[in-house]
Image (cartoon, grey):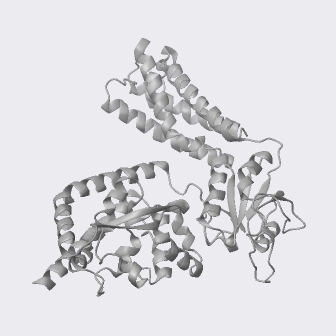
Amino acid sequence: MVSGHQYRVVSVVGTLLGTVAAVVVTNHPAAQWLTTVVPVFRRLPANVLTGDKLTLAAVTSALIVLGCLLPLFKPRPRRILDTILLTQKRVVVAGFAMATVGYFDWSYPLPRSTLALTVVVMLVAFPVWFVAIGYRPGREERAVVVGDDPEEIRDVLDATDVPVVGYVSPPSPYYEGERGVATPAVADGSGEGALDDLDCLGGLSRLDEVLVEYDVDTAVLAFAHPDRAEFFGALDACYERGVDAKVHRDHADDVLTATTATGNETIVDIELEPWDWQDYVFKRVFDVAFAAVGLLAFAPLIAVIAVAIKLDSPGPVFYSQERTAELGETFEVYKFRSMVTDAEAETGATISDEDAGGVDPRVTRVGRFLRQTHLDEVPQLWSILVGDMSVVGPRPERPELDADIRSGVVEWRKRWFIKPGLTGLAQINGATGHKPEKKLRYDVEYVRKQSFWFDLKIVIRQVWGVLEDVKRSLRKRE
């Protein structure tokens, strides 16, 4: 297998040249003659392009195919059959994309006969190409264990039959395991290893170098108490280097796994790419459209709310707070201020999002109405527009609260794999942070089932719920 950046270059160049070659070959008069002989293509009129038209068709087709085959350019260890099926699926998508572009853009005149023949050629040639550049003949698979817990590392060694070349990062500084024995700190490969029967290849800061130096195929995670940077740093290194990430089934609480619970594998695959890139595109387009329309529609009301807040109590119009984002990051979330200035600093407490509308002396009169009608959340449309949040996803928590819940709910880290949202499956089902297990169940279910239509259903239910809350709030004031 061609590895690392070489794989990316070879796969991209091969796709571009292969697409251009397929268009040129199928545009040849001899190939077009087949459309008059083969029954499947007989109804398609033969049409041979020449000159600039052929150049435009070949270049446009190459760019479309390049975009549709994008997931295949990441150096991922895959079975041969999986590579073939994934490549053919992407070629079919590319065929529909070329047909669509040709239908709406008359400057892209790829004839139907040439398009059909080109797709057939790519369905055969591209799977062979990606299998060829991904195959490693006569080479034994190599694995490395990445983690901070000797007991979990030993569980991995007992369960895997793949040769393990060593482990990266011994236990965290002065971490005391169940046996109460403190272990030495090793940050970058210096210091004493924690396992006598397995070589220590260095700390997490050297993981990227280790994956390249030892030509690693598989990294098995064995973390007990990782912080967000360690956890996602390890996954990101695996993703970037095309290394298959796995975890012991007994320690799979913190990750999204590709193997179902009924599977028999002890070492299970981690989903480094749990969603298709097209799903991301649709989701982002929906987020931008929703946020932009919302901000425009609420623009007059935003001005009224700002004036009302200033008249009701002294202080800023907006309130900001640090919240957790996806993949271990944090961001500033903004709301309309609904409490007196420095309320949290004076009392050392805060009110969570789900307690909106509760009776609290720190909440202003305008703030109480904003919370009851959810209007205090309107500024978060800006966070959605700039990409910090999504319309639908797990609600973002404060970092300190996130850490507290994580220590009591072992699967809480699964929420880290997705961008936080304005609303989510947990919110429309009334699951709050006061019941983290129930909330997590809904959040993980959403992560698994995420799609554009699923998002749309959640948004519709949330909008209906907000309208009901506004109605109840207005009735109370009558």
**Is 234 positioned to the left or the right of 36 in the image?**
right
Q: Residue at x 24, y 80 (%)?
A: 364
Which percent across, then down, holds residue 59? Answer: 47, 24
Q: Is 301 placed above or below 116 here?
A: below
Choose top left, top right, bottom left or bottom right for residue 191: bottom right
Q: Residue at x 36, y 36 (%)?
A: 100
Q: Quadrant of the N terminus?
A: top right
Choose top left, top right, bottom left or bottom right for residue 55: top left
Q: Residue at x 85, y 65 (%)?
A: 193
Asked whether residue 431 appears in the rendered view, the answer is no
**Is 468 positioned to the left or the right of 420 in the image?**
left
Asked whether residue 248 appears in the rendered view, the answer is yes
Q: Nearer the viewer, residue 473 or 442?
A: 473
Looking at the image, which residue sits at the far right? 196
Which percent across, then down, holds residue 200? Answer: 83, 60
Which percent across, then down, holds residue 71? Answer: 55, 44
Q: Is 122 placed above or below 417 here?
A: above
Looking at the image, which residue sits at the far top? 51
Q: Residue at x 44, y 64 (%)?
A: 420
Q: Is 244 placed above or below 475 here?
A: above
Choose top left, top right, bottom left or bottom right for residue 174: bottom right
Which percent across, then down, holds residue 453? Answer: 36, 59
Q: Nearer the viewer, residue 53 or 235?
A: 235
